[in-house]
Amino acid sequence: MLHNFTAKYTKINAGYMGQLIEWPDVITEGKDIEECRAMLRDALNEMVLAYQMQNQEIPLGNSLIEQLPVEIDDVCQAA
């Protein structure tokens, strides 16, 4: 059965960090977004196999992530 997981990518000094929203233990880094995505997919596959071998429950995916805009006044004004 196919499950979808939600990836979150954060720009870091070394490139990108990728983490799964539904399964925060699945986290990795890559020099660019493509490498990070590939490494995150590999890490997810490895975690699924490890959880299956240990008879642990695999977190379900299919989360919905939504960005909500908000206007914020500039609080960094010079004195």
Image (spheres, rainbow, N blue to C red):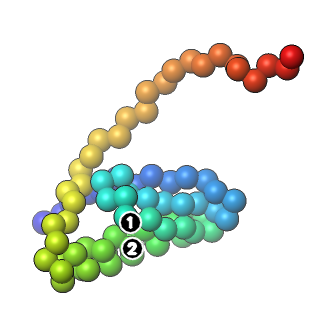
Callout 1 amino acid: Val
The relative height of residue 72 versus residue 46 in the rendered view (above or below) is above
The x and y percentages for residue 37 are: 47, 65
The image quarter containing residue 75 is top right
Characterize the local packing of mark 2: few (<14), some (14-19) or many (20 or more) Cα atoms within 10 angstroms: some
The relative height of residue 62 versus residue 74 in the rendered view (above or below) is below
The relative height of residue 75 versus residue 28 in the rendered view (above or below) is above
**Quadrant of the image for the C terminus?**
top right
The x and y percentages for residue 77 are: 79, 19
The relative height of residue 66 versus residue 27 in the rendered view (above or below) is above
Q: Which mark is residue 26?
A: 1
Callout 2 amino acid: Ala
The image quarter containing residue 51 is bottom left
The x and y percentages for residue 42 are: 39, 75
Residue, x 64% and y 57% (percent of image)?
Answer: 12
Residue found at the far right of this picture: 79
Badge 1 element: loop
Residue, x 16% and y 72% (percent of image)?
Answer: 56
Label 2 belongs to which residue? 43
Badge 2 element: helix
Q: How many marks?
A: 2
* Left or right, 72 with reference to 60: right
**Marked residue nearer the N-terminal end (2 or 1):** 1
> Looking at the image, which is closer to me, 57 or 29?
57
Residue, x 13% and y 77% (percent of image)?
Answer: 55
Circles 2 and 1: CB atoms closer than 8 Å: yes
Foreground: disc 2 or disc 1: 1
* Left or right, 38 with reference to 52: right
